[in-house]
């Protein structure tokens, strides 16, 4: 079954888009769901498996639910492909119930995926991840993937798209609290963070910073393998591409990390 066609022209051809204009996405980008094209799932995984850092593959809660997304919700998982079915992005979402108040937001991405699977009455779509292959980043594909998510929500009669956004430059400022980081703005008023900015350009608003969104715990040895670092004593550590510090406790042989996110809402 053919997927939707998205036109790739810049929405805001302003000075601030010049970085993206350097490399334009291909024309006739299509979004195809896993139900429509299950044969692309493996290739999509291979093309994007190195996009997030290794530690991100070990969520305490996320990993319990993640394999069920493609098995039980194939209509809400999709890929962006070009005219030759080349993978341009891999995207995961889950429908869930939300009453529209900040207080009723799930407890981060962990709470979102649990609510999506464990409770019924879904009325909104929740973005879980968009991954663009490393060699294609910086070409404007993320906006097209977000538009595809919004379109998916509309087609299923869902009221809005919410997202526990993983701010991709937070790794440069791991010791800054997420509520302060999320409030940083450029002179043009848009968010300082590039990924928050993509959402904001499409009209999304920030609902709530989420300091404890994605829980990752492991033994000290596991964290050393995931990060390529040694942790010789108990304490807090910076580590490569971490969005927040890692707490190491040698006595209990535990490394504990909470990835911060920022809840955003797109009205449809
Ligand atoms: C975040 C991500 C989806 C952006 O996708 P993309 O198609 O490369 O982004 P775009 O070309 O649309 O650019 C969007 C903005 O991000 C910036 N950007 C693009 N690649 C970037 C990178 N690797 N690092 C930092 N900023 C980047 C662009 O300059 C642009 O900012 P602008 O407002 O100055 O124009 C992509 O980098 C990615 O897959 N990252 C790893 C997975 C991840 O973190 N996903 C988001 C959490 S769900």
Image: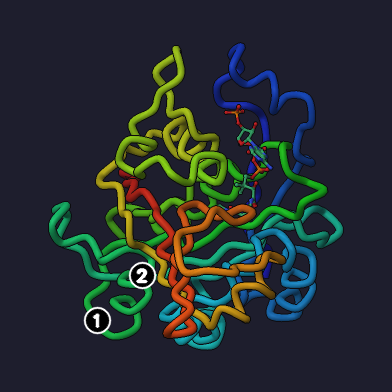
- Residue at image mark 2: 95
Residue located beneath label 1 in the image: 120
Q: Is residue 246 left or right of residue 57?
A: left
Name the spot of residue 101 as percent of width and height, x first.
14, 53
Mark 1–mark 2 distance (CA, rounded to whole Å): 9 Å
Q: Residue furthest right?
A: 84
Q: Secondary structure at mark 2?
A: strand
The residue closer to the viewer here, 59 or 111, is 59
SS for dot 1:
loop
Residue at 75% across / 80% down in the picture?
Answer: 39
Residue visible at 86% across and 58% down in the picture:
84
Question: Which quadrant of the figure contains the N terminus?
Answer: bottom right
Of the four image quadrants, the one with ligand 1 is top right
Camera sees residue 184: yes
Q: Could you tell me which residue is drawn at 74 percent across and 57 percent down?
A: 81
* Residue 199 pos. (x, y %): 45, 39
């Amino acid at each position: 079954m053919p997927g939707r066609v998205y036109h790739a022209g810049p929405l805001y051809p302003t000075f601030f888009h010049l970085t993206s204009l350097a490399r334009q996405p291909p024309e006739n980008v299509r979004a195809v769901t896993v139900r429509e094209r299950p044969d692309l799932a493996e290739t999509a995984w291979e093309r994007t498996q190195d996009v997030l850092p290794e530690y991100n593959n070990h969520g305490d809660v996320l990993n319990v639910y993640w394999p069920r997304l493609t098995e039980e919700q194939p209509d809400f998982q999709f890929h962006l492909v070009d005219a030759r079915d080349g993978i341009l992005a891999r995207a995961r979402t889950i429908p869930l119930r939300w009453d529209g108040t900040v207080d009723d937001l799930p407890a981060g991405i962990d709470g979102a995926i649990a609510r999506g699977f464990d409770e019924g009455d879904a009325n909104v779509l929740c973005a879980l991840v968009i991954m663009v292959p490393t060699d294609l980043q910086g070409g404007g594909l993320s906006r097209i993937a977000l538009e595809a998510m919004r379109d998916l929500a509309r087609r299923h009669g869902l009221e809005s798209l919410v997202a526990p956004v993983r701010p991709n430059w937070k790794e440069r400022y791991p010791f800054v609290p997420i509520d302060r980081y999320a409030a940083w703005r450029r002179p043009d008023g848009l968010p300082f963070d590039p990924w928050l900015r993509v959402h904001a350009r499409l009209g999304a608003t920030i609902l709530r910073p989420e300091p404890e969104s994605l829980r990752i715990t492991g033994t000290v040895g596991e964290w050393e393998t995931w990060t390529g670092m040694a942790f010789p004593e108990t304490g807090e550590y910076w580590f490569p591409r971490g969005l927040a510090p890692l707490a190491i406790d040698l006595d209990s042989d535990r490394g504990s990390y909470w990835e911060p996110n920022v809840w955003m809402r797109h009205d449809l």
